């Protein structure tokens, strides 16, 4: 029996590709058209849906909307079916963003009053990368997340030649007026805008890349959330020289240390689970055999790293738990692992951050780990943290942005982000026929630097 589509006028063949949380845009016309077709529906009650637009491509947007049988308005009039604000070419500096912020927030406040219930606002915006890095997209999203409901994001990845990699990205932020919207504007703290100087950010990794890791080995698949050595190696080569000391406070099966050893660096870390610790040590012993390279993964809580006699660390790269998402019952990924008799979470240890149910406590406990790690980092050391924003029970928790804000406050300098994009996972029709919930196929690789005077 076919599922009735109450949300838009497109079929599953067009719906599913839009579910992917990152995309390579062809051009602005295609970007506008795909959003108009997905987020509006023409029917007997509303044969010509009205869409608000603000941006520098008003004529193009109006032409595309008209071609799709939609009406464009440039004022927040009543009964809007969709709203699009395109800010991609508006802000070239932090100063220009701050001077225009009040106007954007005022427009969004008006849109909240005129947008239909359970309809979406989309904002296209890019972060500022020169002369310093300032995550204005994150700041705007956090400023609006209580006015509307922050529902999701998609990452526009501008392609570099024929490679699935590139130096340019932008964000498509999606908000919805719904029962979870507070209708109250709470501008984000300016702390989040204290970005870093990109002059010393010498990296050949760009801003995004599709990473297709090889099939995991038998002992590696035992870990429920392993990240690929191929990804780690790129960062290690970009941020360190041979012989450097690389560290991971949550080592798992030793991906970081194995990658470090394969690149001619030393690998250190801690791991809470005896089960994964044993696997990690075996893998490191195999990789380091016949070399003079050092490795040491201690079976300890990561908060204790400052007391564990590690050498001074040149670079830290890690992927912490994504809150308690591995403990969520009924998840498709969990079901597949259960069928195979594999471990479903990191551990049952009460000290395991992946077992903390309260979001704010989880973030605070994670910051405590990084504060401990800061004590063994050399001044000027780089840090990469692989995370993603989290969707849980119909709400969006901007984990990557919240974590960055607290680490900036701790004293680490925020550098440009990188996205690990995945295209080797099957799309699932979440919300099909009723609402939009993306398949999150991008991971943030957040980059920081410990200040040289710290």
Image (spheres, helix red, strand yellow):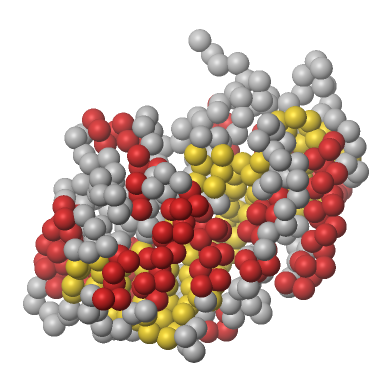
Q: Which residue is drawn at 35% across and 49% down?
A: 354
In the displayed structure, 84 sits above or below 50; it is below
Along the line of sight, which residue is nearer the eye, 421 or 343?
Answer: 343
Q: Splitting the image into 4 quarters, where does residue 345 fall?
A: top left
Q: Residue 64: percent from the left, percent from the top?
A: 79, 40
In this rendering, position of residue 384 left or right of residue 152 = left
Q: Is residue 239 visible?
A: no
Determine whether 81 is above or below 161 in the image. above
User: In the image, what residue occupies the spot 13% across and 58% down?
Assistant: 278
- Across and down, in percent, residue 4 comes to 60, 16
In the image, taking residue 290 as reference, residue 166 lies left or right, namely right
Camera-nearest residue between 395 and 421: 395
Q: In this view, does 183 lie to the left or right of 320?
A: right
Question: Residue at the location (62% across, 51% down)?
Answer: 25
Q: How many labels does the image show?
A: 0
Most extreme residue toward the top is 1
Residue lying furthest left: 290
Q: Position of residue 311 (x, y in %)?
A: 26, 83
Camera-side residue of 110 and 303: 303
Residue 33 in the image: above or below residue 248? above
Q: Where is residue 309 in the image (x, y as percent from the top left)?
A: 22, 79
Using residue 277 as the reference point, say whether residue 192 is left or right of it. right
| x 67%, y 48%: residue | 145
Q: Is residue 288 visible?
A: yes
Work out whether residue 359 or residue 23 is closer to the camera in this orientation and state it: 359
């Amino acid at each position: 029996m076919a599922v009735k589509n109450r949300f838009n006028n497109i079929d599953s063949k067009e719906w599913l590709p839009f579910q992917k949380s990152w995309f390579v845009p062809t051009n602005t016309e295609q970007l506008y058209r795909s959003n108009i077709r997905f987020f509006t529906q023409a029917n007997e009650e509303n044969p010509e849906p009205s869409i608000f637009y603000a941006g520098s491509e008003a004529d193009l947007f109006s032409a595309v909307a008209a071609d799709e049988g939609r009406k464009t308005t440039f004022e927040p009039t009543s009964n809007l079916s969709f709203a699009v604000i395109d800010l991609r070419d508006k802000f070239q500096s932090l100063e220009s963003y701050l001077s225009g912020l009040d106007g954007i927030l005022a427009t969004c406040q008006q849109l909240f009053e005129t947008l239909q219930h359970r309809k979406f606002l989309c904002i296209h915006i890019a972060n500022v990368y020169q002369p310093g890095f300032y995550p204005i997209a994150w700041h705007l999203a956090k400023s609006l997340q209580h006015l509307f409901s922050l529902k999701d994001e998609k990452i526009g990845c501008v392609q570099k030649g024929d490679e699935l990699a590139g130096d340019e990205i932008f964000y498509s932020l999606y908000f919805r007026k719904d029962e979870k919207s507070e209708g109250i504007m709470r501008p984000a703290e300016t702390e989040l805008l204290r970005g870093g100087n990109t002059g010393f950010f010498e990296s050949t990794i760009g801003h995004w890349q599709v990473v297709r890791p090889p099939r995991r080995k038998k002992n590696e698949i035992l870990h429920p959330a392993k990240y690929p050595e191929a990804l780690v190696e790129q960062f290690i080569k970009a941020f360190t020289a041979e012989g450097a000391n690389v560290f991971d406070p949550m080592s798992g099966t030793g991906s970081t240390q194995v990658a470090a050893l394969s690149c001619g660096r030393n690998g250190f870390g801690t791991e809470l689970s005896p089960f994964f610790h044993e696997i990690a040590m075996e893998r490191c012993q195999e990789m380091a055999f016949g070399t003079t390279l050092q490795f040491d993964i201690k079976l300890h809580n990561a908060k204790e790293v400052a007391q564990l006699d590690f050498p001074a660390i040149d670079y830290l790269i890690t992927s912490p738990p994504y809150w308690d998402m591995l403990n969520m019952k009924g998840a498709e990924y969990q079901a597949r692992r259960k069928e195979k008799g594999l471990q479903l979470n990191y551990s049952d240890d009460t000290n395991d951050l992946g077992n903390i149910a309260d979001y704010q406590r989880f973030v605070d406990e994670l910051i405590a780990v990084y504060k401990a790690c800061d004590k063994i980092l050399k001044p000027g050391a780089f840090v990469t943290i692989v995370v993603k924003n989290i969707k849980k029970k119909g709400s969006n928790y901007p984990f990557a942005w919240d974590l960055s804000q607290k680490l900036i406050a701790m004293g680490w300098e925020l550098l440009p982000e990188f996205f690990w994009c995945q295209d080797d996972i099957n799309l699932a029709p979440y919300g099909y026929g009723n609402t939009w919930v993306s398949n999150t196929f991008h991971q943030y690789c957040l980059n920081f630097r410990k200040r040289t005077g710290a």
